[in-house]
Image: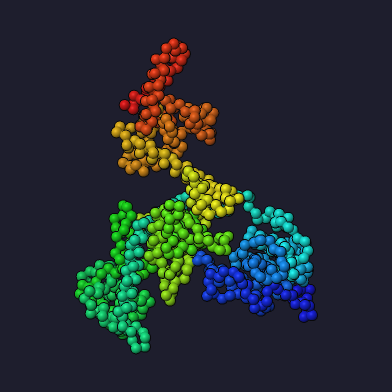
Amino acid sequence: MNISEALEPAQPKPRGLLQPHEEVLFGRFLRDPDEERAVYGDDSVSVWRLNALGRPANASRGWGKVDFGELQSDWLIAAKDLAVVLLNPEHPALVSHAAHLRVRKPIHPRHARCEVNALREYYTVARWGGFPVLLADWKEVHFHEALAILDSRGRITPGRLRSLERVPRLLHSYRRAIPTAPQATLWRLPRDSPFAGRWAPADGEIRTQPVEPDVYFKLLSAGLAYVEVFGPDIARAVKERQILRNRTTVNSPIRKDGRRDYVTDFRTFFDDPRALVPLWRHPDEHDDDDAWNSNINWEHLVFLVTGNEKQSYLVAPGRAVGAERRRLSIAKARSGAWTIGSFAVPIARLEGQPRPWIAKLDKGSLNNQVRMLRTACYIVIAGLTMMRDSEVQEIRRGSLTMHMGTPALRSALVKGTPDNPIMHWWISPAVATAVQLMESISLHPTHLFASSRETRGKASGGISVALNLAVFRRRVNEEAHRTGLDLIPEGRVAPHMLRRTMALITEYERGGQLAASHQLKHAHLSSRSNALTGAYTATTQRWATELKQHDAIQQAQIALDDLALHPHNTVVGPGAPRTKLVLKGVGTTLDRKARARLLAQNFPDLHVGTANLCLGDRSVAECLPHADRDGSVSVKPTACDPSRCTNSVVLPLHEELWRAEEASLKSMLTTPRLSAHMKATLTSRLQEVVRVTRQLE
């Protein structure tokens, strides 16, 4: 017998925690009072909309929707009551029911939706029969059987499994407040449930993977190029467009019916000798009317005349008035009143590029480039601050500030905090530039990341980051021949992966985990901060290789900088010939950065020490036994013999130490009554030192 057949009218109707007219969020702070307020409702109310709590900028309109679907009778009451308890644990109705609940913070609507969906899954299974009609009669064995049925229908994701395990346990623990909940004793802990071990990762394990090094560096490089090089051109064009739109709106006449008088607008444009017709390219003196017609940027011309981007029909050749306006425009352009159509002439270019990064920024191209700049700013902010997607999209105007004497960015912490406290993230100059650019191009009255189009005076907040990142990579690769940017390889990129990648890199620097803990906002989880932050900053094999090479380049740069500052500009020591062979073995002249990369590629384990530069070549290392030179054992700096090992290179910065040792050995040899053995040892060492110091002269 299925549930719908068993529910007879004679059965007493279960009562819920609230009356149908009572508000679900009574007593909660509502950030958006203009949104509708959800009420508990009767059997006909199967959807709550809770956006009044304050929808995060990065969430869709469905963020606050809790759908109870096909649930009926006591199942519907149980689902609604559970949602009330989780969304509003301090609701007065819970006190009136003398419910002793565990202390819990209110959860977000999307989490409540997951719990309701889990109960809907159990209800779907129960409707097929073989299970108790009332949810209160369900026992642990019934949940076991329901899970087996759900398993047979296909793979259950870890997120679904967590909800399927948690809902029966929560309902049972709240049975004092929710009489329709299961009354029989169930498992008390997740590890005792039939779901144990099926979803939980190992302690400290983070499932988020970093962006691959080659993808990350090219993506970040493109983002920085847009922010620091191309951004000023785009911001200037946006400003010019807004000035033009405002001027046209103010000066244009209004007809008696309240509509714009475009006839007067065009007459004024054709009569004004200062007005210029925008062209796509420089005209040729032999061009006929057809060539001039195709060369004029008609959409941009309409915008220059009317200030409206959506009035291209005003010059449509199929209309008599449009054809006449085209004829007058061609005549005006032929008289010399033309310009290459754009709001601002781009002047920026990347180093080594012969021409500006884009030919012009007109109506069509500017909209695309504004979106590209917005995505670039997102990449720079998310990649260099370790902010979550919700935190980046909650950035508002005026968020640049100082925190503990350091430039910082202020935003709301959304995850795990129903009160959304304002937090601070330390920033670099590039991030500050990105925020300033977003303040100049954003159309939203408060938020920086919003639609790039005006929608009836108010742009909608938030952007689709996944879509924007994909478009950004595609357009960068398509326009690389013109802009000079490097191609961005294929590879998965997501906001949480940018955060994970920067945390990994930060860990590599001195004091990195403390900085990462602050930026990741794990510091407030005092009992777990070390494990959580440590897992987030853990490296991968690809990144370990990349960071090791980065360290080698840094060490090589130190060596080359020291040589550049020394008048002799030469290396000495047993390993000097190998070093010189690498640096001079190419037929072209390399700059210092290229030489550092070349040196690091040939000696990936090189390290600048106290007495010398070690090339790190295990195959010739005097500090290793012959049996270990072909293995994976690293060189041992503490056992180094810098005067004989062919890995040893003495730089000018080491000269003072070698001179001091030479003087010390000479002084010791003058000691009276020195034994023959000690004198021979000191003499041998002095000869080795002198071989090096003579080359330093």
Give the left or right position of residue 42, taking residue 396 as reference.
right
The outermost residue toward the bottom is 256
Q: Position of residue 168 (x, y in %)?
A: 71, 63
Q: Position of residue 187 (x, y in %)?
A: 74, 58
Identified at 50% across, 31% down, the residue is: 636
Identified at 32% across, 69% down, the residue is: 240
In the image, residue 16 above or below residue 401: below
- Residue 244: which quarter of the image? bottom left
Front-most of residues 537 and 325: 537
Give the left or right position of residue 191, taking residue 538 as reference.
right
Identified at 31% across, 85% down, the residue is: 320
The scheme the figure's colours follow is rainbow
Q: Quadrant of the N terminus?
A: bottom right
Front-most of residues 529 and 299: 529
Q: Position of residue 241 (x, y in %)?
A: 33, 70
Front-most of residues 574 and 667: 667
